[in-house]
Amino acid sequence: MLDIKFIRENPGLLRDAARKKHIPFDVEKLLEADRTRRERQVDVDARRARLNATSEDIGRMDDADAKQKLIEEMRELKRDLADKEKAFADADAEFQNLMYQAPNIPDPSVPDGASDADNKEIRRWGTPPAFSFAPKDHVTLLHNLDLADFDNGIKVAGFRGYFLKREAVLLEIALWQFAMRELSGKGYIPITAPSLVREENFTGTGYFPQGKEDVYQTQDNTYLVGTAEVSVMGMLRDETLAESELPRKMVAISPCFRREAGSHGKDTKGLYRVHEFRKVEQVIVCKADHMESVQLHEELLANSEELLQKLGLHYRVVLNCGADIGLGQVKKYDIETWIPSQEKFGETHSASYFHDFQTRRLNLKYRDAEGVTRFAHSLNNTAVATPRILISLLEQNQQADGSIRIPEVLQPYIGIDVIRR
RNA sequence: GGAGGAGUGGCUGAGUGGUUGAAAGCGCCGCUCUCGAAAAGCGGUAUACGGGAAACCGUAUCGUGAGUUCGAAUCUCACCUCCUCCGCCA
């Protein structure tokens, strides 16, 4: 959510933002709703002021007749007030509704574009592994080594269901531990986060109302998170932090659930697109300072690149174009990791910053050096998402004999250096 | 799941229909005193929105939301959260 004062003063920026993000949004309608809401608030406040003042008088009066007369008058006023209050409530609801839909302003460095095809590659790290044989895809590798069971996964869990087995499980756990340990070494606080959370956390992080279709809801009106970002940001909702506590760097692990509504035909095989997975996520809350946000955004990206480099995985970084960044995001990088069997890169990480878009919704503030409370800034990035990263990890490390080398940095967590049958 | 109890400002805590946005204490800030500090004394210390050039004014907020009333922290209802006891349980 943006500051309405900012919108009043810069309607053009919001209009441009919506256009760049390819999000339909009527700025004039919002400004009109803002004007209406304020007019009606004045109506309500004036009547309330009179009611309050008169009620105080009544409390002090002795003359029963005069008192009764005023009470009658106030009854009349209250009927009028009720109408005005209803009118205000309607206008305010309309205003809030539009405010929740207003996109954040993308950074000027965000390229124009109509789809993810227009994302700009920034750099590549490493080279595609050279194979003296035709590399197998991850589904085949998993099957040959008995590392997963998709048939029974679907039997048990339905479409996109899967079981991981044997060393694939150890590998998954090793990745979490590796990521957790690396990042906690950099001062990120490790957290295990709830994945079953209440609605306000989704609204607060900017996923609701527009993204409700993508989320599982329970019969208790709680929802399953698609990322620990939702619960970790929710953890700080309604807090006023001291500036000395910032930046607060956290690394959280949680199960993640995504309905993948609208992507039924896509990536139907294997571990790429599943309804249920595990993810280690970096989340930062920092001062309301653009340069600090930018700097920490780069840090989050560098952290994830470092993890991939230590794992020895070939990847590239792309700068997402306007159409491929979310409502609240100012700027986003994706890291895409090389998938040999497809000879292309697949998204494994997503790093974004929000300025105060999320914290305004979450009412997450801090007290600055002058004692002024401000909305903080927030950012996040994937550290490692499993099992998706296993696709690249297995495929890039496969050998001619069908075995799979385990990256050196993971070996201490698993106790083996190769998977073979 | 069953039975009770409770949610007031940064904190403790008073307040059961009428100048209560809220006593008192603690904390914090400023001043006085002091070479300095402590102590003591005095004064000040919530947030949001709206109006205004400003001073300032208005409105809302005592867990949240509805309601009763001329008037609600105080009465009613629903919800949320916490505590105690019983049951169940990884």
Image (spheres, helix red, strand yellow):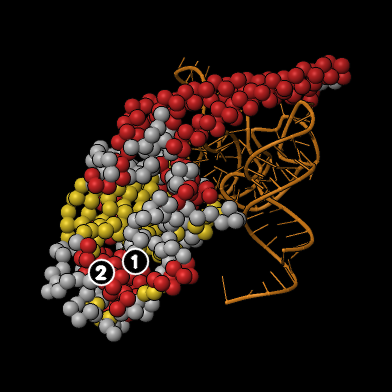
Residue A313 drawn above or below residue A2: below
Under tag 1, what secondary structure?
loop
Instruction: Find residue A137 and name its label.
Output: 2
**What amino acid type should be assigned to the residue bearing mark 1?**
Gly
Q: Quadrant of the C terminus of chain A?
A: bottom left
* 1 and 2 marks in contact (CB < 8 Å): yes
Q: Position of residue A104 (x, y in %)?
A: 37, 38
**Which residue appears at 41% of the width and 69% of the height?**
A162
Q: Position of residue A194 (x, y in %)?
A: 49, 61
**Which residue appears at 23% of the width and 51% of the height?**
A318
Q: Which circle's residue, 1 or 2, is located before the other in the chain?
A: 2
- Which residue corresponds to mark 1? A270
In the orientation shown, which residue stands out farthest toward the bottom? A421
**Which residue appears at 39% of the width and 74% of the height?**
A149
Q: Position of residue A10 (x, y in %)?
A: 35, 27
**What amino acid type should be assigned to the residue bearing mark 2?**
Asp
